């Protein structure tokens, strides 16, 4: 039998995700995770599956986010996804909707959620997407993000990520709004807005 709190929690998850608005439009919310009956593996799987369905509201049910400012997470590096979920869960990374969503997961579910999305396929590059010339600093980025910025153990995949998400993330690092990666903060602070824009346009076209 499903935990009595689960229908209520899931209903709230659906409503908040559907109303996901600009980051400063809602207060920080911390969710109490729905828990299965101890020892009931099938119930645990069903609860996690329902929670992950809510992710589709923003990240898309085919891996293509519904909003251009939302990142692609299908096929992303698992270790990166785990870190970001832990950072949202602990408050190390700030985003009202994602803090709320991460705290709806138990610590054990954070890893399972990351693995679930990492095993999916990265969305296909849109037909006719035009590649731009690589900015000089791309060579520096490849040290962590690997050849063609396809990602690996040191850092996440950037190639084909959404332009709007990339340029906003770079700005947030540069201006000290995103603080969960000191190296990225230092790198982005050294670039001008125009350089960051050129980088985001190039990477999104890969």
Image (tube, helix red, strand yellow):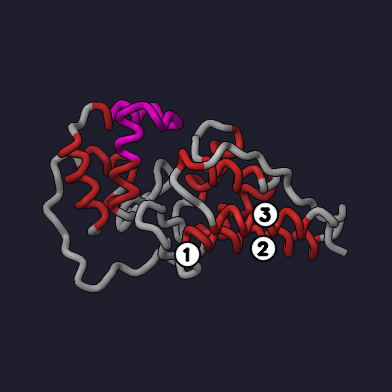
Instruction: Specify few, some or many for label 1: CA neighbours under 10 Å numbering under 14, 14-19, or 20 or more.
Output: some
Q: Position of residue 87 (x, y in %)?
A: 54, 36
Label 1 sits on residue: 60
Q: Main secondary structure of the magenta part?
A: helix
Q: Position of residue 119 (x, y in %)?
A: 52, 62
Q: Quadrant of residue 7?
A: bottom right
For this view, does 41 lie left or right of residue 64? right
Label 2 sits on residue: 49
Query: Magenta part of the protein: which range?
Result: 169-187
Q: Position of residue 78 (x, y in %)?
A: 51, 51
Q: Nearer the viewer, mark 1 or mark 3?
A: 3
Q: Alpha-carbon distance for marks 1 and 2? A: 15 Å
For this view, does 152 lie left or right of residue 128? right
Q: From what the image shows, is residue 120 above or below residue 84?
A: below
* Residue at image point 50% right, 35% down: 93
The quadrant in which the C terminus is found is bottom left
């Amino acid at each position: 039998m499903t935990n009595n709190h689960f229908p209520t929690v899931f209903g709230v998850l659906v409503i908040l995700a559907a109303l996901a608005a600009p980051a400063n439009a809602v207060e920080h919310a911390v969710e109490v995770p729905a828990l299965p009956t101890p020892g009931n593996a099938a119930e645990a799987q069903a609860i996690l599956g329902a929670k992950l369905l809510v992710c589709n509201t923003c990240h898309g049910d085919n891996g293509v986010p519904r909003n251009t400012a939302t990142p692609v997470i299908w096929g992303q590096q698992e270790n990166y996804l785990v870190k970001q979920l832990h950072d949202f869960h602990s408050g190390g990374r700030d985003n009202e909707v994602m803090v709320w969503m991460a705290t709806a997961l138990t610590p054990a579910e954070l890893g399972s959620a990351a693995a679930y999305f990492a095993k999916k396929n990265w969305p296909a590059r849109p037909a006719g997407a035009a590649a731009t010339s690589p900015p000089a600093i791309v060579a520096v980025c490849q040290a962590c993000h690997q050849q063609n910025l396809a990602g690996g153990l040191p850092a996440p995949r950037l190639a084909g990520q959404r332009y709007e998400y990339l340029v906003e993330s770079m700005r947030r690092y540069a201006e000290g709004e995103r603080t969960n990666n000191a190296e990225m903060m230092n790198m982005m602070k050294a670039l001008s807005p125009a350089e960051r824009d050129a980088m985001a346009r190039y990477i999104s076209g890969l």
